[in-house]
Amino acid sequence: MKLSASALINLNQPGKYTDGNGLTLVVSKSKSKSWVYRYQINKHRREMGLGSYPSLSLKEARLKRDRLKVQVNDGFDPLAERQHEREQAKIFLSMTFATFSEDCFEELKPSFKNKKHQQQWINTLRTYAYPVIGDLPLKEITPQHIKAILDPIWLTKCETARRVRQRIERLWYWGKFLDYCSGDNPALKKGNLEYVLPKQPLQYQNHHTALPYPQLPGFWKDLQAVECLSSVALQWLILTATRTSEVLFARWREIDRDQELWIIPKERTKTGREHRIPLCSYALDFLRNLQSAYPSDHLLFSSGKNKVLSDMAMLTLMRNKFRSLQATPHGFRSSFRDWGETSNAYSHRALEYALGHRVKSKVESAYQRDDLLLLRRQIMTDWAGFLNRKSQVISMAS
């Protein structure tokens, strides 16, 4: 006999009351009421709690029962899945920074130039980061923890301190990609640690050497002749005037082919705002070639099995193939800005938006109703034309 909503209110006698199709209301000796779904799968009887009454009404309990019944009929065990989810949640909660770093290090090993670089990468974390945050889950790491790591070495071992911070920043983003953490990256320097860390001695500050923009077309042609994923990633970085981290973690789902845009979500930008990058016809052709030569389901630039390309890959390429230029990947953003400002064809504000910068004037920010997308589309088309001098996209397939 089916239960009724009115009868449930006065149903206080301890016992089990069946509604049909496996749904049962259990009344305890303390008169608390809870819903249970009973089913059989692989010749085993199972009982699954659905929730308490009246928090879960009769109607809601029946709907929940019906959804679970469909799963059971398809051979799916909902209770086993719930237990699996709880076990996974425990793993997520217990994933410490040290454990995660070691796992990531194993994946990154093939990307290092030699064993010395391998050990330098992980040993800096083991020496300086693990004593402070090694036993903490990623989601519990705060900027205060990062400052505690850096304070003892920021002014005495400047280069090491910078690299430790960068590696923690990257690992945290990697963890966010895998849903181990969320929110703002605690290791970010811009708009975060820069306010609480003293300025390092001038010779240790991280200047991004830029290639003079008139030399770019020649360099671009030479870069296209280098057939490797690092070269392709660096071409995309230059073509879109974006940051290294934005390129390394770029995903195919961020590409809107209909709108001809690459939309970098706010979680991955330095400013914390969504950055829309217009894609000219050359850039769209570039992506088609990329997908053909280096197929990947998620990342644009995957070093295999959706592994993130090493954060040193493009810089290493520059050092090995173009050492005489003394330029860095990030410096190409300065080359782009110099090209744009020298041409006198584009406003300073449009170039700032193209680089994904915040508009510094509060008045401009208040009255700027869009991100100058149409104007920036022309800028990026002109930029691609400048780089290529009307050349065609070179096939990436070897």
Image (spheres, grey):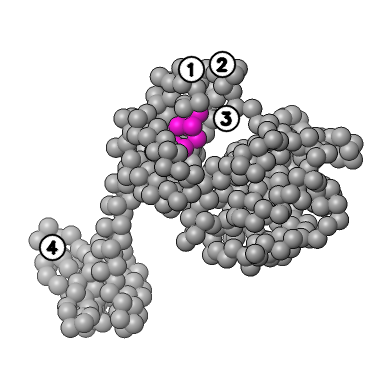
**Quadrant of res 53:** bottom left
The span from disc 1 to disc 4 (Cα, nearest Å) is 65 Å
Query: Mark 2 vs mark 1: which is more N-terminal?
Result: 1
Q: In the image, which disc is placed on residue 201?
A: 2
Q: Residue at x 28, y 58 (%)?
A: 86
Q: Find residue 360 and report its horizontal and vertical position in percent.
A: 71, 30
Query: Mark 4 vs mark 2: which is more N-terminal?
Result: 4
Please tell me whether mark 1 sits on a helix, a strand or a loop.
Answer: loop
The span from disc 3 to disc 1 (Cα, nearest Å) is 20 Å
Q: Magenta span has 166? A: yes
Q: Residues within 10 Å of mark 2 (few under 14, many from 20)?
A: few
Q: Find residue 261 and report its horizontal and vertical position in percent.
A: 71, 56
Q: Residues within 10 Å of mark 3 (few under 14, many from 20)?
A: few
Where is the C terminus found, in terms of image quarters? Answer: bottom right
Q: Residue at x 26, y 82 (%)?
A: 21
Q: Are marks 2 and 1 in contact (CB under 8 Å)?
A: yes
Please tell me whether mark 4 sits on a helix, a strand or a loop.
Answer: loop
The span from disc 3 to disc 4 (Cα, nearest Å) is 56 Å
User: What residue is pinned by disc 3?
Assistant: 191
User: What residue is pinned by disc 1?
Assistant: 155
Tag 4: residue type? Ser
Tag 1: residue type? Leu
User: What residue is pinned by disc 4?
Assistant: 28
The span from disc 4 to disc 2 (Cα, nearest Å) is 70 Å
Q: Is residue 85 left or right of residue 163?
A: left
Q: Which residues are magenta?
A: 162-168
Q: Residues within 10 Å of mark 1 (few under 14, many from 20)?
A: some
The span from disc 2 to disc 1 (Cα, nearest Å) is 7 Å
Closest to the observer, 215 or 27: 215
**Quadrant of res 164:** top left
Whether residue 54 appears in this view of the structure is no
